[in-house]
């Protein structure tokens, strides 16, 4: 019972925000219309049940005129039923796509807000494969929730309608047991309830293992799909290293988990199907077996037999709703668990970000960037860096160097505001824009125009500025391809991608530019040319670079080195100024 209440609470928490949100009127109207159609459907079924008695009595009495009349009545009922069925599906799909759209916008907004997606990945928590949560689980949740809700509503209304009919048709069942006379009013209702209750209990015992198996199957499938995408995205590196056999073995190992778990689902499903199929076949004949003694005793006519059998079947089917929907319920429960886990992870990550001891404050004085008392830590809590002070003046170029693994990139992440572990104060001048160029630029799929303008909207820059920026960084051949769509991360070489990233910096003209080995794929002459370009085009931009080449020293006024003594955190040491290249 506690598990059921917990599930219902989770479903309420996932569902009710939509019906209280900005789309509540349309969503509520669609849901009301669908419920009204369900009521109409049940009413038509009740009318057809009553029609059964008249129709089969006409057959038994060989009354041809009544027989033909009832065929026309049935045609009318059937036409209404068809219309109801069509609009049930149409309005349900309409509500489904609106609800899914609302949930997708909500989840995408929460996941991408304030770099939550990055912080969640650092945590490595239960919300694995967020792409699956947003793309597949939301769709499954909405469709299955509507299906189960409407199915349960139909079962309840059908039960309420036909239980009264069946009770009236049942009469009293009298028998003598141990010398005592027993009378059971409405015995057919109790027979249907007992039959369905026993079936539901047995179905739960047999099929409950499917809940965990379905949950695991979705996780294994998502992991396998993610690895396939990684192979596609890193195809060149894998091909150059001839890593095909290793990737094949790794992918087959991932797929092995999919297959092994699926065998478990197959076995569990087979057991459940043995039971449900047998239960369904027995359900066809069980009402007739229960009702037929009264017919053969002459107590009822054929029409009453068929009406009673139909009513009994409807009541028994309503009681058996959980049996018939058990597989869907198992899948639905796993989807609910995954979405709840995703929401919980997003909320916890955002709460941790609010509790972060890194503070971004307005910088005082002329410097656009001023960091004070920074302590950068690893996720396990170990201190990585201690930074007493770091100031960048307007137009100043500073080179940050040090051994690999000393924490240079992590320091840039802390300054950029995406690293959550540690404490300190990062001052940014009011209105100043900070732009970070990582070593491996991100190029979204789409037009070259969109890749170049990223992360700003497409309309931020006209064609002349885009072409001029490409030509300035040494990519004149791309200037005529702005509207060409494609996987630019695969089309362009590493050096071309880094040139394009520098073109972004020229367009944005940030107040602070952070470069994390952003020119490492270029030769030294090309690298020097880009640094001279940045100095000429962005004379007021404060620039902080990470790099290992000694030739970078002459492109900066200051050089800061990360040094570590013993096992303690690394610290910044200013080296004497070097001559700056013209």
Image (cartoon, helix red, strand yellow):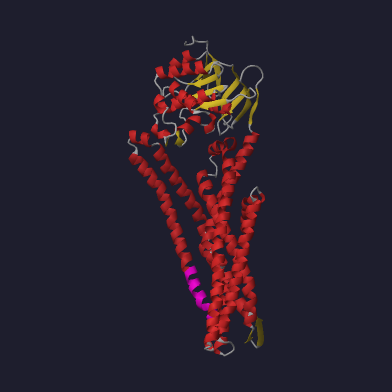
Give left or right: position of 533 versus 357: left
* One can see residue 356 in this view: yes
- Picture layout, residue 571 above or below residue 460: above
Q: Nearer the viewer, residue 445 or 299?
A: 445
Q: Residue furthest top?
A: 579
Q: Residue 322 falls in which quadrant of the image?
A: bottom right
Q: x%, y% of residue 270?
A: 45, 64
Q: Is residue 278 magenta?
A: yes
Above-or-below relation of 91 to 572: below
Q: Quadrant of the N terminus?
A: bottom right
x then y, percent, for residue 321: 57, 67
Above or below for 473 versus 327: above
Instruction: Give the left or right position of residue 297, taking residue 489 as reference.
Output: right
Q: Is residue 302 visible?
A: no
Q: Is residue 218 magenta?
A: no
Which quadrant holds residue 313? bottom right
The magenta segment? 275-290
Give the residue drawn at x 63%, y 77%. Answer: 165
- The residue closer to the viewer here, 138 or 545, is 138
């Amino acid at each position: 019972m506690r598990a059921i209440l917990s599930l219902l609470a989770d479903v309420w928490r996932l569902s009710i925000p939509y019906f209280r949100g900005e789309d509540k009127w349309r969503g509520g109207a669609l849901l009301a219309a669908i419920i009204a159609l369900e009521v109409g459907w049940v009413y038509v079924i009740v009318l057809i049940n009553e029609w059964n008695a008249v129709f089969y009595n006409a057959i038994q009495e060989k009354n041809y005129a009544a027989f033909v009349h009832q065929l026309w009545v049935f045609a009318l009922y059937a036409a209404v039923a068809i219309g109801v069925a069509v609009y049930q599906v149409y309005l349900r799909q309409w509500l489904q796509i609106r609800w899914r759209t609302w949930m997708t916008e909500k989840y995408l907004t929460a996941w991408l807000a304030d770099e939550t997606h990055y912080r969640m990945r650092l945590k490595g928590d239960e919300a694995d494969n967020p792409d699956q949560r947003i793309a597949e689980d939301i769709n499954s949740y909405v469709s299955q929730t509507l299906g189960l809700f409407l199915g349960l509503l139909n079962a309840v209304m059908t039960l309420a309608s036909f239980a009264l009919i069946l009770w009236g048709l049942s009469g009293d069942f009298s028998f003598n047991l141990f010398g005592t006379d027993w009378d059971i009013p409405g015995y057919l209702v109790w027979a249907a309830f007992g039959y369905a209750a026993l079936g539901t209990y047995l179905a739960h015992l047999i099929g409950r293992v499917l809940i965990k198996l379905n949950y695991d199957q979705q996780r294994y499938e998502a992991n396998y799909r993610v690895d396939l995408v990684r192979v596609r995205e890193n195809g060149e590196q894998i091909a150059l290293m001839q890593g095909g056999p290793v990737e094949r073995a790794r992918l087959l190992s991932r797929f092995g988990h999919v297959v092994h778990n699926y065998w478990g689902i197959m076995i569990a499903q087979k057991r459940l199907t043995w039971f449900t199929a047998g239960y369904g076949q027995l359900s066809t004949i069980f009402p007739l077996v229960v009702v037929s003694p009264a017919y053969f005793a002459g107590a009822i006519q054929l029409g009453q037999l068929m009406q009673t059998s139909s009513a009994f079947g409807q009541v028994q089917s309503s009681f058996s709703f959980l049996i018939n929907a058990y597989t869907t319920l198992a899948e639905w429960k796993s989807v609910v668990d995954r979405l709840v886990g995703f929401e919980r992870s997003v909320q916890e990550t955002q709460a941790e970000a609010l509790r972060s001891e890194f503070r971004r404050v307005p910088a005082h004085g002329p410097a656009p960037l001023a960091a004070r008392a920074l302590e950068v830590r690893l996720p396990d809590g170990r201190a990585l860096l201690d930074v007493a002070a770091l100031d960048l003046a307007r137009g100043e170029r500073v080179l940050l160097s040090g051994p690999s693994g000393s924490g240079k990139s992590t320091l840039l992440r802390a300054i950029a505001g995406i690293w959550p572990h540690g404490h300190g104060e990062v001052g940014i001048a009011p209105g100043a824009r900070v732009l970070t160029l990582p070593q491996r630029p991100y190029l979204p799929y789409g037009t070259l125009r969109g890749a170049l303008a990223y992360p700003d909207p497409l309309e931020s820059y006209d064609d002349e500025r885009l072409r001029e920026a490409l030509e300035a960084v040494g990519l004149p051949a791309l200037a005529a391809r702005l509207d060409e769509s494609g996987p630019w991360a695969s089309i362009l070489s590493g050096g071309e991608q880094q040139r394009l990233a520098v073109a972004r910096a020229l367009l944005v003209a940030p107040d602070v530019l952070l470069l994390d080995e952003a020119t490492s794929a270029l030769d030294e002459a090309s690298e020097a040319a880009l640094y001279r370009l940045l100095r000429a085009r962005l004379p007021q931009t404060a620039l902080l670079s990470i790099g290992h080449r000694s030739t970078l020293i002459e492109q900066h006024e200051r050089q800061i080195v990360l040094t570590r003594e013993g096992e303690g955190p690394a610290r910044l040491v200013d080296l004497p100024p070097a001559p700056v290249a013209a």
